[in-house]
Amino acid sequence: MGEKEEIFKKLIEAVDLGDEDLAAEWANKALAEGVPPYDAIILGLAEGMKLVGDKYERKEYFLPDMLISADAMYAGLNILTPHIPKDSQSRRERSSSGSWRGMSTTSGKTSSR
């Protein structure tokens, strides 16, 4: 397992355990090791919340467990987010119409005039 994969695994684990200190520690480690912050967020923190959500659906976790895990995720996000470049790829994913790729621009309301 490479260094990046270990970092992602530890971020997932930190979120799963709801450990804010561990999430912050590994978010800082990701930055120190040159892991792109966006990758650490998506492949680490977000995957951890996906795991927590799956456990909730299987009734292994309850709502308080999800909230504790969310706090851990935010501990990591608060460290990683400021290091994402303002002109990152996510901003370029918008289409020329200003909507996000894959999202509808309609509000769901129709006119009956």
Image (tube, helix red, strand yellow):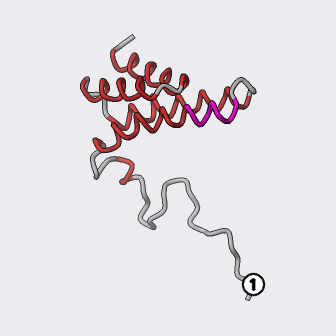
Q: Is residue 95 left or right of residue 63?
A: left
Which image quarter is the N terminus in? top left
Which image quarter is the C terminus in? bottom right
The kind of residue tagged 1 is Ser
Q: Farthest bottom residue?
A: 113
In the depicted structure, whether residue 5 falls above or below residue 92: above
Q: How many marks?
A: 1
Q: Nearer the viewer, residue 14 or 111?
A: 14
Q: Residue at x 41, y 65 (%)?
A: 96
Image x and y of residue 59, in percent: 75, 27
* Residue 8: quarter of image: top left
Residue at numbered disc 1: 112
Few, some or many C-alpha atoms within 10 Å of disc 1 (few <14, some 14-19, many ≥20)? few
Q: Residue at x 30, y 23 (%)?
A: 29
In the depicted structure, whether residue 68 falls above or below residue 107: above
Image x and y of residue 86, in percent: 28, 52
* Residue 107: quarter of image: bottom right
Dominant secondary structure of the magenta stretch? helix
Q: Residue at x 61, y 29 (%)?
A: 52
Q: Nearer the viewer, residue 45 or 21?
A: 21
Image x and y of residue 35, in percent: 30, 28
* Residue 109: quarter of image: bottom right
In the depicted structure, whether residue 15 falls above or below residue 102: above
Q: Secondary structure at mark 1?
A: loop
Q: Residue at x 43, y 60 (%)?
A: 95
Identify the magenta region. Answer: 62-68
In the depicted structure, whether residue 81 falls above or below residue 95: above
Q: Farthest top residue?
A: 1
Image x and y of residue 87, in percent: 28, 52
Q: Is residue 102 left or right of residue 4?
A: right
